[in-house]
Amino acid sequence: MPLYEHVFLARQDLSQAQVDALAENATKIIEENQGKVVKTETWGLRSLAYKIQKNRKAHFVMLDVEASGPAIAELERQTRMNEDVIRYMTVRVEEHENGPSVMMRKQERSDRGDRGDRPDRGDRAPRPRREEEI
C-alpha cells in the first residue's frame, strides 16, 4: 500500500483539544477507507512566514499514512471543506521516517553549546568611513 505524509495547518485561535479532534477526524476518514495512520505528530503553534487568511500563526499537525489513492482523495476533500484548516499538503513517500520527524528533533536540539569558537564581537575596531569625493 502506498505511503503518504499529510501535513495540515489549523487556525491559531483553536484550542489544542480542537486540533487533536481534527487529527482524530483525519484518522477516522483514513481508517473508514481501509487505510492506516502509522504516526501522528503535533508540532504545536508556530509562526507563519506570511499571513494566511489573516492568521500569523497556526497549529501544525503531521500524519504518516498508509492508504490507497481514493482514501487520500477523500481525506483531502474533507480537509478542503473544513474551515478550521487553513492549509494542507499530502506527499507520497518511499518510506516513513523512524523516530521523530525533523521538526520534532529541531525542538529537542539544545546541544549547540556556547559557541566558544566565535570571536568576541566587541574586540573589533569600527570600520573607517570613506570620504565621498565630489
Image (cartoon, rainbow, N blue to C red):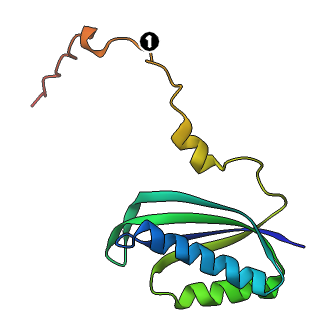
The quadrant in which the C terminus is found is top left
Q: Residue at x 45, y 86 (%)?
A: 83
Indicate the position of residue 63 as horizontal and vertical percent values: 67, 66
Find the residue positioned furthest to the left.
Answer: 134
Whole-percent x and y of residue 27? 68, 76
Height in image: 67 above or below 74? above
Residue closest to the far front: 17
Q: Nearer the viewer, residue 34 or 78?
A: 34
Image x and y of residue 25, in percent: 61, 81
Q: Residue furthest right?
A: 1
Q: Quadrant of residue 122?
A: top left
Horizontal and vertical percent for residue 105? 60, 42
Across the whole image, how many numbered discs are drawn on residues? 1
Residue at the spot 51% in from the left edge and 75% down from the top edge: 87
Is 134 situated left or right of 121 in this image?
A: left
| Left or right relative to 69: residue 86 | left
- Indicate left or right for 80 with 130 as reference: right
Q: Is residue 41 above or below residue 104?
A: below
Query: Residue at coordinates 42% horizontally, 14% vertically from top-left?
Result: 118
* Residue 133 in the image: above or below residue 43: above
Above or below, 73 against 16 in this view is: below
Give the residue at x 53% y 91%.
Answer: 81
- Camera-side residue of 23 and 70: 23
Reading the image, the residue beneath label 1 is 116
Amino acid of disc 1:
Gly
SS at badge 1: loop
